[in-house]
Amino acid sequence: MSAAYISTVGSSVAIAAAAAAAAKMRKEEESMTNYTGDDLNGWEFKIMRASTAYFKKSENLQKVIQEEAQAGWEMVEKFDNNRVRFKRRTDMRGSDSMLGIDAYRTTVGMGEGKLVGLIFGILALVGGLIFALILLARDGEIGSVTFGSNFVMIAIGVIVSVLFGVIVIARKNK
């Protein structure tokens, strides 16, 4: 099995898992945001999302609350460390053009595109490292390490190290 194949399969599984998680979150949000006609009369709502656990840090949450308050948004509730719901009076829309910010933004922190790019980059790096190790091991040895089960252990060690690096980077971007 080639490193490229493993990277492709891993990427496909990760994409499918992310899509399933997003669908589950949307369904959950719909059940948590049941509004009556009176609730909507004169009000608009939005959910602010983060790709990482951005709202886990209270400083980040407070910063977003202050930024959204400039456009008249009030925090209704924090769903979890990735989602916060806001509301505002519809008559606040008139001053949106003078704010200098997007009053209807719905994402903060590391964007999904950047996160996906980071994951794909790391998968490509791991695949390249495995491929390089295979090329170096054509004669059956990498230095004094015998090719075979030791190679698998080296590859697993590289993958675990890279995944640990991803976790550290993601936590720093919260």
Image (cartoon, helix red, strand yellow):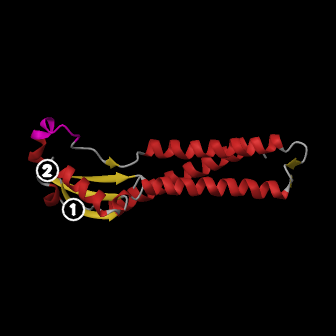
Residue visible at 63% across and 56% down? 161
Residue 76: assigned label: 1
Three-letter amino acid code at disc 2?
A: Gly
Residue 97 inside the magenta-drawn segment: yes
Contact? badges 2 and 1 (CB < 8 Å): no
User: Could one spot residue 23 in this view of the protein?
Assistant: no
Viewport quadrant of the C terminus: bottom left
| Within-10-Å neighbours for mark 1: few <14, some 14–19, many 20+ | some
Q: Position of residue 129 (x, y in %)?
A: 70, 44
Vertical position of residue 98 compared to residue 66: above or below: above
Q: Position of residue 35 (x, y in %)?
A: 22, 60
Q: Position of residue 98 (x, y in %)?
A: 12, 36
Residue 30 inside the magenta-drawn segment: no
Q: Residue farthest to the front?
A: 143
Q: What segment carries the magenta color?
A: 95-102
Residue visible at 62% across and 46% down? 123
Q: Mark 2 points at which residue?
A: 72
Element at label 1: strand
36 to the left or right of 82: left
Element at label 2: loop
Vertical position of residue 101 compared to residue 13: above or below: above
Residue visible at 32% across and 64% down? 79
